[in-house]
Image (cartoon, helix red, strand yellow):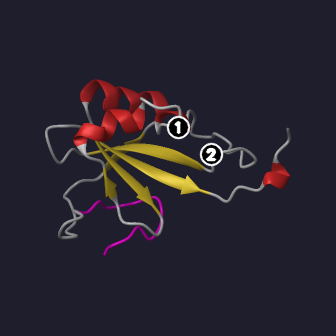
């Protein structure tokens, strides 16, 4: 099974046959831009995490994943390109979204997930 070897990704692949898609990164996004593509335009979403296979979200679960819960992807997505990561608080991950050339009738958003271990000794409060 093909897995993400490092970030940023330069290629996306089909999970069934592992063939590369003919697409490329168009631009990095911020949370509000990603939100507009996902919620308003029904974008296809791919989640990439180093060491894991690409996760292509099912169309019927995208809205739930992105916005419907307090622990949604929306809330843990960068809001500025120079954003500092506070590794002293949970959650211990953050998404970096980017827009790619579409491979269907919908926009394509890649969420590159960066994770780090939680250390309660770093917690300030």
User: Looking at the image, which residue sits at the far bottom?
Assistant: 1
Q: Is 97 rendered above or below residue 54?
A: above
Q: Is 10 rendered above or below residue 38?
A: below
What mark, if any, has residue 71 been given in the picture? 1
Does the magenta segment cover residue 3?
Answer: yes
Q: How far apart are marks 2 and 1 (CA)?
A: 9 Å
First along the sequence among labels 2 and 1:
1
Does the magenta segment cover residue 43?
Answer: no
Q: In which quarter of the image is the N terminus?
A: bottom left
Q: What are the residue bounds of the magenta stretch?
A: 1-13
Report the residue at 62% width, 45% height from top.
Answer: 91
Q: Kindly state the secondary structure of the residue where label 1 is placed.
A: loop
Residue ID for mark 2: 91
Residue 34 as seen in the image, left or right of residue 92: left
Q: Are the residues tagged 2 and 1 within 8 Å (C-beta)? A: yes
Return the residue nearer the eye: 60 or 28.
Answer: 60
Report the residue at 36% width, 26% height from top.
Answer: 36
Report the residue at 25% width, 32% height from top.
Answer: 42
Give the image quarter of residue 5.
bottom left
Report the residue at 31% width, 61% height from top.
Answer: 11
Residue 59 as seen in the image, left or right of residue 79: left
Coordinates of residue 15 in the picture (x, y in percent): 24, 64
- State whether the magenta stretch is mostly helix, strand or loop: loop
Q: Is 56 rendered above or below residue 73?
A: below
Q: Is 71 rendered above or below residue 24?
A: above
Neighbor class of circle 2 (other Cα within 10 Å; few <14, some 14-19, many 20+) is some
Coordinates of residue 122 in the picture (x, y in percent): 83, 51
Return the residue nearer the eye: 121 or 12.
Answer: 121
């Amino acid at each position: 099974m093909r897995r993400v070897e490092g970030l940023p990704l330069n290629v996306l692949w089909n999970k069934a046959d592992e063939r590369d898609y003919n697409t490329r990164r168009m631009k990095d996004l911020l949370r509000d831009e990603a939100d507009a593509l996902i919620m308003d335009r029904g974008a296809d979403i791919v989640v990439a995490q180093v060491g894991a296979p690409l996760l292509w979200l099912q169309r019927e679960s995208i809205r739930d994943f992105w916005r419907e819960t307090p622990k949604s992807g929306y809330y843990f997505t960068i809001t500025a390109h120079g954003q500092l990561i506070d590794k002293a608080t949970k959650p211990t991950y953050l998404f970096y979204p980017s827009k790619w050339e579409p491979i269907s009738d919908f926009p394509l958003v890649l969420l590159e997930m960066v994770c780090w271990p939680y250390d309660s000794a770093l917690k300030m409060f």
